[in-house]
Image (cartoon, rainbow, N blue to C red):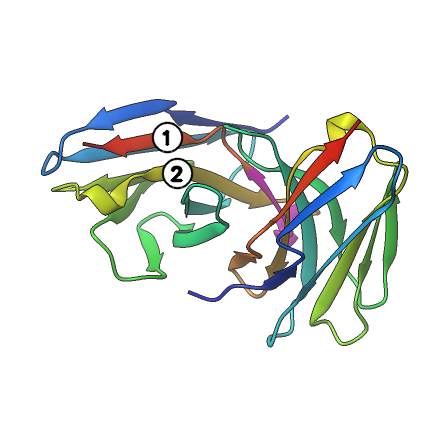
Amino acid sequence: SQTIHQWPATLVQPVGSPLSLECTVEGTSNPNLYWYRQAAGRGLQLLFYSVGIGQISSEVPQNLSASRPQDRQFILSSKKLLLSDSGFYLCAWMGGRGREYTEAFFGQGTRLTVV
Amino acid sequence: GQQLNQSPQSMFIQEGEDVSMNCTSSSIFNTWLWYKQDPGEGPVLLIALYKAGELTSNGRLTAQFGITRKDSFLNISASIPSDVGIYFCAGKGAQKLVFGQGTRLTINP
């Protein structure tokens, strides 16, 4: 069965420090991968998605970047964090019905607090 | 970024009542999904809809994919305390999955 791992679960970082959040998927190949951010009490905002190794699509201009160095690994990074980068970050993979990619499954999330 | 219009934003109901929420979009989607999120957790998939007009049930939950492919609704019958949480609709186009703003459900015993 497929599983998705996201870490760390919580993170407190000072303003101006770098960031690296990692997400890995097991039990599937060539998944679509997604990074979302959720502000407190708000909906999920799509930040980046990737349909293959090295292929990254950015949805909103921001202080973050994403990379996909391996098929089942998706990394969210920042060189210098801002206070506004605080939030709940969720990684998701999409699969289901073979290669049709119709159902998305989420990791447990990383709560990032920038102080 | 693109988002769906989900309503209502919040609901306060009595245990045992039925619940209805919906999502609309200006774009056509190939798939509609409904998720539930508990505090501090990632969303969990409840129901997936693949065809316009499709009506699907999962226990006390029923969801429909609108005929125009621009809307969907979710009904919960006979609510129980564990139904508390935030419910999200999501629409899938070619590659992207976009979410509504969520409906926060609170149940009074």
Query: Which is nearer the eye, B80 or A55?
Result: B80
The mark found on residue A111 in the picture is 1
Asked if residue B83 can be seen in this view, the reply is: yes
Contact flag, marks 1 and 2 (Cβ < 8 Å)? yes
Q: Is residue A103 magenta?
A: yes
Amino acid type of the residue that numbered disc 1 sits on in the rendered structure:
Arg
Q: Position of residue B70 (x, y in %)?
A: 69, 72
Chain assignment, label 2: A
Magenta region = A98-105
Q: Earlier in the sequence, mark 1 or mark 2?
A: 2
Amino acid type of the residue that numbered disc 2 sits on in the rendered structure:
Tyr
Mark 2 surroundings: few (<14), some (14-19) or many (≥20) residues within 10 A: many
Relative height, residue A36 to residue B21 (above, below): above
Q: Secondary structure at mark 2?
A: strand
Relative height, residue B88 to residue A1 (above, below): below
Q: Which residue is mark 2?
A: A89
Asked if residue A8 can be seen in this view, the reply is: no
